[in-house]
Image (spheres, coloured by chain):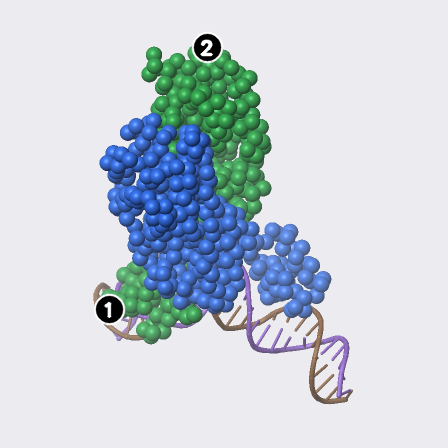
Chain colours: A blue, B green, C purple, D brown
DNA sequence: TTTGTTTGCTAAATCGTTTTAGTAGATTTG
DNA sequence: CAAATCTACTAAAACGATTTAGCAAACAAA
């Protein structure tokens, strides 16, 4: 029941000196502030002896820095985001920052609520996967000089730091890869979301198809229904109606899941002849049957870039002085699901 | 660049009243403290007008409550933990708490470092998946009156709140299920960790085997090597050497992953005749070929129990007055990988 | 009329730091 | 030898809230 936390004041009293002196010593300003070596050592020794740990809350109140970062994503339990969280966590803790996570479920109301919750001096920086309609809130954050980095997508005509991958190039290359492997009727299954990253993925697919003079087959699942687990039904129907398809490209991971499930229920053998590529990798895709070719986002690189940029922003007096739009390249992990034809032939 | 945060003092000055009054009103103590209705409303209106948001840091310093909980797990990017994080997050935010997460990688040094980091008044409560050697630190936390709940495993002879599942019963039942489905040479692949939850899983398996007069086949992969991705080799070797096996029970999820990979590399067809059960479910197991039977921890129930208990602890004056060891039952998700024989026969 | 109670409000302490603006005394400089 | 500089240290304000203790004025009870 005893919560005897040692404070700087206790130390000062015990040693019969002022709190100022203790504070100076503990902050390594002894030399600068002309505290004698003897006293400095005495304070240091005593602080160690009583296991003094500064009260971060008090420090925060005084300095205005909380040493806390917010990592706001769509859903922290999503493979991509949780893996990324793990990488960011390591770097952040190493640099003396803690990380608070939250999931906005891509909903504006949730996003706004959460940002509002953290805005009041609470946190030192924001890493945000923005929901579609929060451009003005992001602008406000920047206006108020909070370090902000957008992740995975950003807003057109809003000056804001961001780390994204080149979605268009990624799907272009992946589609080309399918074509090179003799798949000629490739479907692209996506949502009807008008968010930048989804649009770009679609563009990449379409330009590859166009370039090869093929026919494009696009299924846009209504975003709202995709989240209710209705995707499976849409996909089943689509596949049934398009008998000529020989490959499917899923634009995002939960659609892949729904798709695989649909295939399994409809016709388990179909999957072995069908070409499949998915956006976003998962550990289990490399042990699936067939192993599934995936557009893999470079998690390590994204995490490193994010934190490197964030640490620079945190040092900045005026965050508007740094404005980086970092674009990384995804990697196509080629596996069985996109190479069966060439193997056979 | 303007960070015009409105403080209680600003409001007081603007309205020409004292900060005390403003504080009372804003904390809903107007009635109790005899603040007139008129003034109360005036303050309320003005606070809303200037969009006053209390500075949580200052509040924390004064009240000693940070409204932050720590969720410390082995690895936040692990399926089980990230799903659980998502559930806990929702409840916590709903109750006005934020969640800081961290991964201890099941290492004592990391655990100790992290706990130490958070101990100094920083956080209001701890949910911890403890690494093996931190019993005394947990005891210390409790001694110092911090709310603590252990998750997934606990320490013998340490009075501490915990939420775990009945591992022994779960593996017992699952093993019995295999036996009932005509698998008679069942291997149990686990690590050599002496942590409670792993021990119990092994006991469950062994008692089921014993009860049915079968032969037990146990592979204990050295814990250290299991983390270096060596598991696959151990499993391959084990399978090669034990030709009579007709089923495998993986004691934890990363072993399953290694196992499936091993099977795939060794003999892709083998997996279709082999019985398989895994501890800890994953979304993709229900679309694997074959779909994989899994011992599934009741995520929702665990999350709810955790937070319900935590909220009670947070209200407590002396945390030692509550001591609950909650044990939940896992659910066996029966799928193809454990029922192929009975289907055939 | 005096005493006691209620109403309406506020001054000041406090939480644990950091930081500004000193103050003596010793030493150096012109 | 007076003025300037340096050394070693400290008092007190500040960060933004909460909370204790208390002060008048109004009202009620005796």
Mark 1 vs 2, N-terminal side = 1
User: Image quadrant for the C terminus of chain A?
Assistant: top left
Identify the mark at residue B213; answer none if there is no mark. 2
Mark nearest the camera among 1 and 2 is 2
Q: Which mark is residue B323?
A: none
> Looking at this view, is B330 or A247 the one in front?
A247
Seen at 55% across and 33% down, the residue is B229
The residue closer to the viewer here, B303 or A336, is A336
The 10 Å Cα crowd at callout 1, few under 14, some 14 to 19, many 20 or more, is few
Q: Which residue is mark 1?
A: B38
- Subunit bearing disc 2: B
Taking depth in this image into account, of C21 and A90 the one nearest to the observer is A90
Chain that bears disc 1? B
Q: Is residue C1 above or below residue A208?
A: below
Disc 1 element:
helix
Q: Position of A172 compared to A41: left or right?
A: left
């Amino acid at each position: 029941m005893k919560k005897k936390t040692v404070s700087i004041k206790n130390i000062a009293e015990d040693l019969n000196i002022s709190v100022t002196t203790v504070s100076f010593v503990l902050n390594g300003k002894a030399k600068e502030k002309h505290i004698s070596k003897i006293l400095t050592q005495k304070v240091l020794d005593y602080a160690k002896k009583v296991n003094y740990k500064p009260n971060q809350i008090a420090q925060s109140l005084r300095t205005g820095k909380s040493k806390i970062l917010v990592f706001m994503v769509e859903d922290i339990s999503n493979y991509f985001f949780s893996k990324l969280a793990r990488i960011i966590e390591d770097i952040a803790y190493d640099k003396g920052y803690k990380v608070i996570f939250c999931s906005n479920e891509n909903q504006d109301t949730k996003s706004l609520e959460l940002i509002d919750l953290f805005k009041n001096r609470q946190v030192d920086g924001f890493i945000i996967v923005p929901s579609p309609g929060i451009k003005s809130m992001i602008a406000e954050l920047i206006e108020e000089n909070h370090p902000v980095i957008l992740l995975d997508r950003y807003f057109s005509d809003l000056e804001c730091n961001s780390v994204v991958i080149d979605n268009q190039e990624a799907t272009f290359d992946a589609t080309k890869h399918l074509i090179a492997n003799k798949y000629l009727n490739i479907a692209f299954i996506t949502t009807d979301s008008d968010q930048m990253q989804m649009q770009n993925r679609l563009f990449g697919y379409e330009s590859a198809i166009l370039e090869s003079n093929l026919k494009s087959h696009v299924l846009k699942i209504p975003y709202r229904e995709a989240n209710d687990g209705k995707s499976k039904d849409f996909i089943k129907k689509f596949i049934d109606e398009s008998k000529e398809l020989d490959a499917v490209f899923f634009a995002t991971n939960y659609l892949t899941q729904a798709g695989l499930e649909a295939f399994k229920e409809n016709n388990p053998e179909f999957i072995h002849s069908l070409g499949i590529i998915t956006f976003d990798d998962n550990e289990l895709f490399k042990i699936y049957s067939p192993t599934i070719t995936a557009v893999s986002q470079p998690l390590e690189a994204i995490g490193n870039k994010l934190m490197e940029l964030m640490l620079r922003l945190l040092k900045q007096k005026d965050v508007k002085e740094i404005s980086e739009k970092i674009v990384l390249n995804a990697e196509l992990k080629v596996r069985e699901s996109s190479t069966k034809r060439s193997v056979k032939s």
